[in-house]
Image: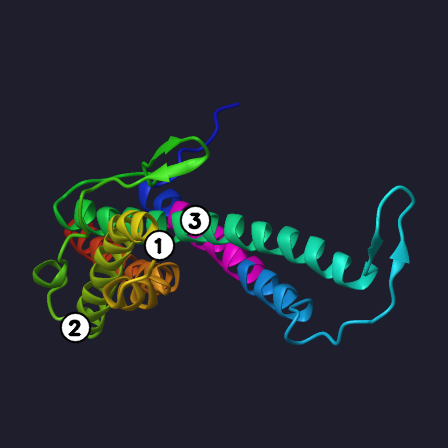
Amino acid sequence: MSIPTRAWFHSLAESVSALGAAVREYRAAHAAARVTSWHIHPLRVLSAEGTVRVLGRDHIRPHDDALLRLGDLSKEMETRIEKLYEDAALAYAYGTSSAVLAVVQGGRPSHLALGRRDGLYERPAASLPDLREHLGHWARSARLASLRQRLTERERAAVTVRELSFFADLADYESAETTEAAALAAGLADSAYAYGELAETALHHVLISYRTTTTAEESP
């Protein structure tokens, strides 16, 4: 029994949608991790004053000890999830925009094609393509361009943070430039997700246009 071959545009749309769903899982997990960190933050929790004598050692404050241990674990988990969220969101943004560009240029990709190394995605392009000239009169083209600009700015800020942090560590201080760049870079994952989400809508637009044109050409 032969298995019917699915049209390339169906599997491509599903491929993009699945990556978007993965990003949303990481996004929700990251939000939950931040809430957990706040629940055990020393500034929020009133510390219990009692101490416990540990045999062979001095006294410890068990409540403070618990908050410290949980804080370390929570921060580690939050950092790891944030890295995965950022990685998947950037893959979503870059992969989807590359798929849009491929389709409008006459390509027929059946799936997103992304590199993978050490559990993280590799971007398919050095920079996000500017899709404005390829989307014709699509009503949300300007919004997509605006999100692209914002994402590009945050990516540059993230690079700046990495570069300046090295010198800040050497001098044991944090410069104003580092602080400003860090504030901008902090929203990198959210910006990548927002761009990827709208780029997925753009992909649906070009796929519908392709199917409409193909159907018209095949009609007698």
Left or right: 64 in relation to 31: right
Give the x, y percent position of residue 82. Answer: 48, 54
Residue name at image x 23 percent, y 54 percent: 160
Give the x, y percent position of residue 68. Answer: 69, 57
Secondary structure under the numbered disc 2 in the rendered image: helix
Q: Nearer the viewer, residue 21 or 71?
A: 71
Badge nearest the viewer, 1 or 3: 1
Residue name at image x 43 percent, y 54 percent: 20
- Amino acid type at image mark 3: Leu
Residue name at image x 63 percent, y 75 percent: 43
Q: Gap between marks 1 and 3, in whole Å?
A: 40 Å
Numbered tag placed on residue 29 in the rendering: none
- Disc 3 or 2, which lies upstream in sequence? 3
Left or right: 72 in relation to 84: right
- Amino acid type at image mark 2: Ala
Is 130 covered by the magenta stretch? no
Q: Residues within 10 Å of mark 2 (few under 14, many from 20)?
A: some
Say which residue label 1 marks. 172
Q: In the rendered structure, which segment of residues is drawn in magenta?
A: 13-29
- Disc 1 or 2, which lies upstream in sequence? 2
Q: Is 10 drawn above or below residue 187 in the view shown?
A: above
Q: Is 172 drawn above or below residue 15 in the view shown?
A: below
Q: Residues within 10 Å of mark 3 (few under 14, many from 20)?
A: many
Say which residue label 2 marks. 142
Give the x, y percent position of residue 122. Answer: 32, 37
Left or right: 181 in relation to 53: left
Magenta stretch prevailing secondary structure:
helix
Q: Quadrant of residue 190?
A: bottom left
Say which residue label 3 marks. 19
Secondary structure under the numbered disc 3 in the rendered image: helix
Q: Nearer the viewer, residue 82 or 159?
A: 159
